[in-house]
């Protein structure tokens, strides 16, 4: 088996589900924190577990450059490398390479790009992106896609969508031929078991190889900001056939109302029995809205990146902790939050850490923001279970 | 009461003791991690507690600049500010100001110095250093001293020692007149209790004001590298009378054999029933040696600073985790260590985090190094209890 998806309840378009992966069950709708380089920046894995995070996202492009796919593969794959026994999703590298702008060149075969680290030249194709993601061994991996820039002409939107469809087929073909090569897979189990014994202590807390279990390859619907192209992209991607579908190419600079419109007009063409993953969104308010539109999975750097800039989400709105007004504020960051940060530290202390450039600021701010996002999704799931539409906590109500 | 010190056992010159402070008992010999700006860089307080750390050191000079003494005082003192209910020691700012070199000017009254942050001009005297430390409210505070540079002429050593003696008297006088002003002290208790109620959630985990309890002022023995001056400094400081004595002015560039010689020749003149604090040392091997010489308290930035540079102490020697040889090393950092880092992560992962400049590298490296130091001191205490001289773990045996 690979992943399995069960819809357990619905409320309007919103769905309560379970994504069953080789590394545990993920309750959906789910927000997936981003751990670019196999680390959610500043937060030890045991604290991620304490936050009840069931799946994290890692970036293939970044891991391809550092420490390199082969290193991770040799070490048994990402789960074992980063000591994270729960589920992982990797992106295909397509969007990251797309973000390189001047440093890339696309043709039918794939994308030539220069590393943002040292300018060295690299090539990613659907096949090599699959090979990379099989080597990393995430539970859910993504087809290699091309994302149209915004704004784009209709012809460019179509061209990008067609290319993405051809690449989806190539991704699937390569994956089907090579999926047994996953580091924790059936073919590897004899070897992996020996390794488990050999490494002794480092293996603890990490389960034995998952015999006969595979990764799942999700495809990405493109089509720019054109609902008609999005419909066609969805239908033709579904014809190829995948266990899950993502909506890509959004949050690339378009207004939020347009994002929402495109999500809405794409979701209606996606199968009801498969997970739907909206890539790269959003604020706490937005993730609630998208869940209400029928999205099951989301990821975004916002909670972690904002934390590093001292921007904190609370039940009473956003807080910029660097402000002098918090210098003697003895209150917890969010009196409605039960996270380890709000249970212990005052705004005054968090403000001091941030103003003094202390690393602990990043650690604590990130833990809180993730906790806020996780609580938000927990509330969404609870509401769907009760059959009510959930309203977002007011984190987007920016303070005066 | 202020602090109380009980020697429970001895072995040679080494002593097993208990330093009873208004914020808990500290088992000695103790190593005190440095939390310069009210944070042990990168490590949340709950993990410090898990490491069984009973006392941390904070730097008056740094806190005086950021967030400012008045801010901390208003917020109930350092313990409450940093949400650390256990013991704290602050230095007097003297050594920090000494380290500013060109930015300071010493006269009989005190030291004029420029901030390392913005060049602004400040003045610290024995009186203002005491006022600052009373405002911060650490359990143990230090007399304002002057530290001779190394190497120094004998005349300069005497002059510095005499000045330090006069400043010790002034420090004690000011402290005795103002010790009731500590934010958690008897005089403050009515007010503080109201505050406790008012702040609600932020107060939890932090005990009520310690009625009738005071800080303890320790004095610092100086005298450069001259055993004769050290003896005189010790004797005349003891005549003034303090509940604890520190050995200052070491680890300023002199060879380690000289440090040891001076420690040895100073300790013999210090009272047996009072805690002895050796400031600013050392490696794991050195802290064991100093404990064997009869030192009860030590502090050093080494474990935390080395961690930030990827230098890790293990039972098999020092490791520079940045080295490529660890890129695929699945072993834990130290297979004899039971800390949360060694229980979970591999050297390969720690190497990747460091090489990729991930903040988690600093967090995990610091936790491990502190754990190693704490384990080292635990072993020292155990040996003293058994009446055996302890040998250091071999952390100083640098790898090839």
Image (cartoon, coloured by chain):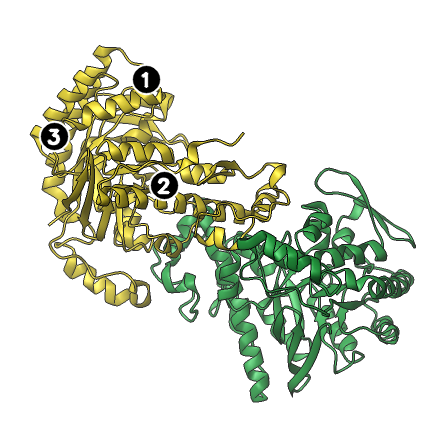
Chain colours: A yellow, B green
| Mark before the other along the chain sequence, 2 or 3 | 2
Closer-to-camera residue (B119/B70): B70
Which element carries disc 3, helix, strand or loop? helix
- Classify residue A240 by image quadrant: top left
* Residue A345, horizontal then vertical, whole percent: 54, 52
* Residue B98, horizontal then vertical, whole percent: 78, 53
Q: Residues within 10 Å of mark 1 (few under 14, many from 20)?
A: some
Q: Quadrant of the C terminus of chain A?
A: top right
* Residue B144, horizontal then vertical, whole percent: 81, 60
Residue at point 85%, 61% (across, down): B174
* Relative height, residue A289 to residue B121 (above, below): above
| Mark before the other along the chain sequence, 2 or 1 | 2
Q: Which chain does the numbered disc 2 sit on?
A: A
Q: Are marks 1 and 3 on the same chain?
A: yes
- Classify residue B295 by image quadrant: bottom right
Closer-to-camera residue (A168/B219): B219
Q: Residues within 10 Å of mark 2 (few under 14, many from 20)?
A: some
Residue at point 54%, 76% (across, down): B378
Closer-to-camera residue (A33/A370): A370
**Residue A150: assigned label:** 1
Spatial CA distance of label 1 from label 3 is 25 Å
Q: Which residue is mark 3?
A: A169
**Residue A36: assigned label:** 2
Spatial CA distance of label 2 from label 3 is 26 Å
Task: Evaluate if marks 1 and 3 touch, with contact meaning CB atoms under 8 Å apart.
Answer: no
Q: Which chain does the numbered disc 3 sit on?
A: A
Q: Between label 1 and label 3, give the one nearer the viewer.
A: 1
Spatial CA distance of label 2 from label 1 is 24 Å
């Amino acid at each position: 088996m690979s992943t399995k998806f069960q819809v357990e309840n619905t409320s309007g378009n919103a769905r309560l589900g379970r994504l069953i992966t080789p590394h545990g069950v993920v309750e959906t709708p789910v927000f997936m924190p981003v751990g670019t380089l196999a680390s959610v920046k500043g937060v030890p894995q045991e604290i991620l577990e304490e936050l009840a995070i069931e799946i994290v996202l890692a970036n293939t492009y970044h891991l391809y450059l550092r420490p390199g796919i082969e290193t991770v593969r040799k070490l048994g794959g990402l789960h074992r490398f980063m000591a994270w026994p729960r589920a992982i999703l990797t992106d295909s590298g397509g969007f990251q390479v797309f973000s390189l702008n001047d440093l890339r060149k696309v043709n039918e075969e794939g994308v030539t790009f220069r590393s943002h680290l040292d300018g060295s030249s690299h090539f990613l194709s659907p096949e090599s992106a699959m090979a990379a993601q099989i080597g990393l061994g995430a539970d859910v991996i993504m087809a290699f896609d091309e994302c149209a820039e915004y704004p784009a002409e209709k012809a460019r939107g179509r061209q990008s969508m067609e290319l993405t469809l051809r690449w989806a087929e190539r991704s699937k073909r390569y994956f089907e031929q090579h999926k047994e090569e996953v580091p924790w897979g059936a073919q590897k189990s004899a070897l992996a078991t020996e390794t488990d014994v050999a490494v002794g202590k480092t293996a603890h807390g990490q389960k034995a190889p998952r015999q006969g279990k595979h990764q799942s390859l999700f495809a990405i619907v493109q089509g720019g900001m054109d609902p008609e192209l999005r419909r066609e992209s969805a239908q033709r991607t579904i014809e190829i056939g995948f266990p899950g579908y993502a909506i890509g190419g959004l949050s690339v600079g378009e207004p939020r109302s347009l994002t929402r419109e495109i999500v809405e007009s794409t979701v209606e063409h996606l199968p009801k029995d498969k997970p739907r993953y909206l890539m790269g969104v959003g604020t706490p308010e937005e993730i609630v809205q998208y869940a209400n539109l029928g999205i099951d999975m989301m990821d975004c750097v916002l909670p972690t990146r904002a934390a590093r800039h001292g921007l904190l989400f609370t039940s009473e709105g956003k807080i910029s902790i660097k402000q002098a007004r918090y210098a003697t504020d003895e209150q917890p960051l969010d009196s409605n939050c039960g996270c380890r940060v709000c249970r212990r530290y005052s705004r005054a202390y968090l403000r001091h850490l941030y103003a003094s450039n202390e690393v602990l600021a990043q650690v604590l701010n990130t833990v809180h923001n993730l906790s806020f996002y996780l609580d938000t999704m927990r509330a969404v799931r609870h509401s769907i279970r009760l059959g009510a539409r959930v309203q977002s906590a007011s984190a987007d109500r920016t303070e005066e």
